[in-house]
Amino acid sequence: MQWNWQTVTWAVVALLLFAAEAMAPGAFMLWLGFAAAAVFVIVLAIPGVPVLAQVAAFVVLSFVSIQVYRTWFRGREPRSDQPALNRRADALVGRVVPLERAIVNGHGRVQIADAYWDVTGPELPAGVAVRIVASRGMSLLVEPAG
Amino acid sequence: MDLGVVLSVVLLFAGVVLVLKAVRMVPQGYEWTVERFGRYTHTMDPGLHFLIPIVYGVGRKINMMEQVMDVPSQDVITKDNAVVKVDGVVYFQVLDAAKAAYEVAQLEIAILNLVMTNIRTSIGSMDLDESLSKRDEINAKVLVAVDAATHPWGLKVNRIELKDIQPPRDLVDSMARQMKAEREKRANILEAEGHRQAEILRAEGEKQAAILEAEGKREAAFREAEARERLAEAEAKATQLVSDAIANGNVNAINYFVAQKYIEAFKALAEAPNQKFVMMPMESAGVIGSLAGIAELAKEALDRQPPRAVPPPRAGG
């Protein structure tokens, strides 16, 4: 066990990075923190590693930690309980509304809460109730309801 | 050693910068476009993302929340050449971050100009009164036009509201005067109507009163006549009864009544306060005669003898 400037420095850097991440969440100092912690373990276990190698290890380990997260932890992120947040078109899926303008050549129009939306679907006369089944960018995909 | 330190410092700096560029966290409510050497490839939704630094970079940071923009006040000429000041407000939301980022430069200026020109167009096609009273129609018209025009920019315009339509001061004054005049006219008409109604009602009342009075008089006359008839009938009957009584009874009975009246009349004369000078009838002896008749009657009643005829006294005195 070697307690010297190098080991102490890496430990302090790691702790400071974690603290900074907690203070200002930017999600990038975390990986640097993990890398610093790993380098600290390395210099503690193997004394006499040159500084350049330590720094190189730190940089490489930062990317390794990012890759580790991407590979193993990415799929475990909790899903949002409101997936349609800020996605106005997706939020409308499932609604049943009357057709304001008949669907001619695949294009019509509905009015939902003040705003007019272009809809695509089968040829239907105006006034028919349609169900929104999906959003296609700027327009909504509809089918006759019932 | 020195070289090693310099290299380490440079390496450390480069490494930190690379990590900073590789790890991107998009906040909720925004979407960031990603460019590969300056060319758009895809859009990052909110959350944690990792980009290969140098090759990939963040292009534009697009706000996906609904935004409100004030439409500055502008002078608009109506169909009937009135100049009005119009301002408003626009609510819009980006639906397609990539289009909003690259299809249009200076998105907000583009939207504002579209809204302003469309407001001009729709108010210019109406006269002043219409534009003041049909705001929702104007709103709807402008909304449809602007929404269609902003479609290629990945926008959804949700609402456009005119906040204020201000005619010039003197026009407002004359509008107020016009309204006042309207109301005064209505008030005058109502007052005249009231007077007319009141007059009619009064005349009606008078007519009714006159009719009722006449009816009352007629009724009274009828009843009076009836009363007179009844009185005559009664007198006739009384006379009949008296004459029946005379026919069937003694004439002295009449004499008795007459004598009674006669004496009562005398009594009245004697009690009269003005004069004590009494003119006696010529045949005052007749009274005495009737008194004798009474004596006779009494006698008859006592003796049950047939009565003697006594001449009736003459009426007089």
Image: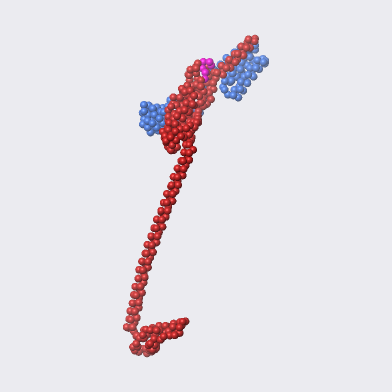
Chain colours: A blue, B red
Q: Quadrant of the N terminus of chain A?
A: top right
x and y, in percent, of residue B269 in the image: 44, 83
Number of residue marks: 0
Residue closest to the eye, B15 or B317: B317
Closest to the observer, B105 or B283: B283
Residue A97 lies, with reference to residue B97, above or below; the image says: below
Q: Residue at x 35, y 78 (%)?
A: B238
Q: Position of residue A15 (x, y in %)?
A: 63, 21
* Magenta span includes B213: no
Task: Relative to A16, say whether A101 is above or below.
Answer: below
Which region is colored magenta? B53-58
The answer to whether one can see residue B156 in this image is: no
Task: Name the residue rendered at 35%, 88% in the picture.
Answer: B310
Kindly give the residue lying farthest to the front in the view shown: B170
* Left or right of residue B79, residue A16 in this image: right
Rendered location of residue B149, percent (x, y): 43, 27
Q: Position of residue A69 (x, y in %)?
A: 54, 19
Residue at 48 percent across and 23 percent down: it is: B105
The quarter holding residue B148 reads top left
The correct choice, above or below, for B138 with respect to B315 in the image is: above
State the image quarter where residue A121 is shown. Answer: top left
**Quadrant, the C terminus of chain A:** top left
Frontmost residue, B97 versus B139: B139
- Residue B210: in sight, yes or no? yes
Name above or below for residue B238 compared with residue B30.
below
Residue at position x 36%, y 72% in the image: B227
Q: Residue furthest left?
A: B247
